[in-house]
Image (cartoon, rainbow, N blue to C red):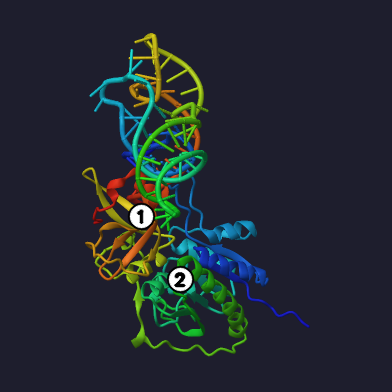
Amino acid sequence: MQKEEKPKLVFMGTPDFSSIILESLILEEYPVLAVITQPDYLSKNKREEFVSPVKKIALEKNIEIYQPEKLDQEFKNWLEKLKPDLIIVAAFGKILPEKILEIPKFKSINVHASVLPKLRGASPIHNAIIEDLKETGITIMLMDKGVDTGDILSQKSIAIEPEDDYITLTGKLAVVGSKLLSETIPAWIKGEIKPLKQNHAEATMCQLIEKSDGKINWNEPAREIYNKFRAFKVWPGIFSFWENKGALNKISFTAIEIAKEKPGEKHHQGEIFKYNEKQIAVQTIDGVIIIDKIQLAGKNETATLDFINGYPDFIGSILK
RNA sequence: CGCGGGGUAGAGCAGUUUGGCAGCUCGUCUGGCUCAUAACCAGGAGGUCGCCGGUUCAAAUCCGGCCCCCGCAA
């Protein structure tokens, strides 16, 4: 059997989702000319620098890496010299100018983690969880000058389990995305796919997640708070503020669950109380959230019961 | 030289300002009480106070250096 000619690729992406897709392309022996990813940024506390997961894979596989600060003329010239046949973009994190997208013979295609036209934008995985959707998926599409507005090449849905969080859902989507991409690329370059226009009237957008999105409002339903916990698992986490000795301390909740049974007495919203002998909980507008692990700013993560040993006043306080 | 909090018994913390017996809560061990228990009572074990050096009659505490953990900012 004769081996098909595979298109020469340039890959653009940054987080774990992207790196899994890049790995599968390499595994399928696509020639990856270069990888473009976000610049490294300096240390957390001056200790180590953050390197994008995509860059790590590229380093392992000895693929050329480009980390442009700006997508300027110099970047365009560099890309033109490479002469890629196709650009693959997966969660790159920057909006690419049309002039760049049109450089390759087979254009530029994007692997987006939602069923477009739903959840266009920067955080489709987070928002699928926050909105408590029962399913989401992968769309592979041609890129145009809009954000996730291009014509669709292929699409696949997957179920979101109630306990899925950002990490597990990202993993599932990346696997599905890799598979769909490996089916879509050959079909596309052979001209077997007719791009399908999106129904722009049904489009929804999602914004970049900000740190402040992780601040919990205890007047929300327990399920909504839990959804944020699932969605913000990697970053920014969920947190609240606790007044101790006159100072407001940021306190993060690193392991929580929704209480199955409501206690007899109702507490203030945001109040910390003993749910039972072994569990500490906080009251929301419609239920109770059990807090298993907690982290006070400047301290390590600890089991809430241990935390209580050192800060007995935590019980009965009201979070802000 | 970006800003800040922290390292004290197995766990979580107080004590450091003003140097002077190593403390609290939980766990753990032993005994007691109890029909029984994660409850209660009595008793015990468990510490290089992150590391190195300095000051001092005396350092967890003051001074200098180093290591490690964490929050913010990017």
Q: Quadrant of the N terminus of chain A?
A: bottom right
- How many numbered discs sit on the rendered protein? 2
SS at mark 1 in the image: strand
* A152 versus A272 height, above or below: below
Q: Position of residue A48 (x, y in %)?
A: 49, 46
- Farthest right residue in view: A1
What residue type is disc 1 on?
A: Ser
To which quarter of the image does residue A121 belong? bottom left
SS at mark 2 in the image: loop
* B51 versus B41 height, above or below: above
In front here: A292 or A15? A292
Residue A140 visible in rendering: no
Q: Which residue is at a point 31% across and 68% down the rendered structure image?
A: A262
Q: Position of residue A64 (x, y in %)?
A: 60, 59
What residue type is disc 2 on?
A: Glu
Q: Is residue A168 left or right of residue A57?
A: left
**Mark 2 to mark 1 CA distance (whole Å):** 20 Å
* Mark drawn on residue A252: 1
In front here: A69 or A318? A318
Question: Mark 2 sits on what residue?
Answer: A163
Chain that bears disc 2: A
Q: Position of residue B63 (x, y in %)?
A: 36, 21
Chain that bears disc 1: A
Query: Label 2: how many residues lie within 10 Å, few (<14), some (14-19) or many (20+)?
Result: few
Query: Label 1: how many residues lie within 10 Å, few (<14), some (14-19) or many (20+)?
Result: many
Q: Is residue B2 left or right of residue A36?
A: left
Residue A314 visible in rendering: yes
Q: Quadrant of the C terminus of chain A?
A: bottom left
